Image (tube, rainbow, N blue to C red):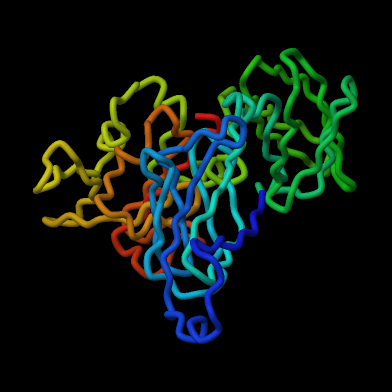
Amino acid sequence: MALLIAVAALSASQGTAQETQEPATVTVTGNVVDDVTGEPIPGVIIVVRALDISFFTDTDGKFVVADVPRGSYSLEVIHRDYQRLEGDLAIDRPGEFFLGLTPIQDPNDWLIKGIVGLVTDQVSGDPVPEVVVNVPAVGRAATTAADGRFVLPDLVAGRYEVAFSHLGYRQRSEMIAVESGHATNVHVALTVDAIELDPIEVTVDRRDRNLESAGFYQRQEDGWGHFVDRDDIDNWNPVDLTDALIRFPGVSIVPDARSPMNRHLRFRRGRTDCAPPVYLDGVLLTGLEGFYLDDIVNPMSVAGVEMYRGVAGIPAQYSGRGTACGVVLIWLRRGG
């Protein structure tokens, strides 16, 4: 969803002489409300990348951008219970503006219910792109991507005959079971010769669409870093998110010196600790005063967490300057 808003003036037009003397920076106030009810939404994260800063809305759904140069800025508006909003905000004078967020009704809508998988060459082990994966009984089909992966979402529970075909390979058909509310994850090997095929590998789990599109599951299979998914969160039932993350080696939770009830996430490096950058749904959290991870994220709203201690294995889009300590990637469930 996109937005394009110009800040409304707080006062009437002023004389030409005054306009020419307007300051180079202005202060604007934003209001974030529910599109359906019109009620203010507290705890919304507002990210302004060009200024390298983030804000939280207060209990009245307000946030203030102080002393910002005039111009157009890209905003990202994030809340776990609402559809993410991205777009441009034009600021040329002091004023106030409103942003409306659309609620997401059912978090299970963001679970993949069907078949996901990987198709490889049985001899080389390389992924096979452009394999047609067909479910004739329901008239559904998908094609593997360059990495050999495919998704057949929104299949009701039952057993399906699934055919895998590619020019130059022997066609293969398998009966695959789909469980209600879960994704069946399969690894299928194809061969060019009339030799005995390896049996397909099948696992059943819950797969979140947000994690799938973000590459979470592929990176988890690659084996770098530490991973937490929604099944882990549900099983552990942590009070705070840091209670779940401290289970992993090299992760420590440090009480704030001024407010011991608040805790900071740290990675251990030898005899010292360091603070890793934290990304929420792909957005770097920066410029947040009094930033405590447990205040920002309710663990039951989390779809998955990736933790990379040091630079090894950090996804390219999150690596670079400031990541020597490592990186934490947090992905939210849609709808809470």
Nearer to us in this view, 265 or 248: 265
Instruction: Residue 332 in the image: state x and y as whole percent.
Output: 48, 38
Residue at 86% of width from left, 38% of height from top? 165
Residue at 40% of width from left, 46% of height from top? 57
Instruction: Residue 216 in the image: state x and y as whole percent.
Output: 53, 43
Nearer to us in this view, 251 or 190: 251
Q: Is residue 236 above or below residue 331?
A: above
Q: Quadrant of residue 23?
A: bottom left
Q: Is residue 111 left or right of residue 308?
A: right
Instruction: Residue 155 in the image: state x and y as whole percent.
Output: 75, 22
Instruction: Residue 63 in the image: state x and y as whole percent.
Output: 41, 51
Residue at 50% of width from left, 64% of height from top? 11
Q: Is residue 17 left or right of residue 87?
A: left
Q: Is residue 246 above or below residue 64?
A: above
Residue at 26% of width from left, 32% of height from top? 243
Nearer to us in this view, 65 or 213: 65
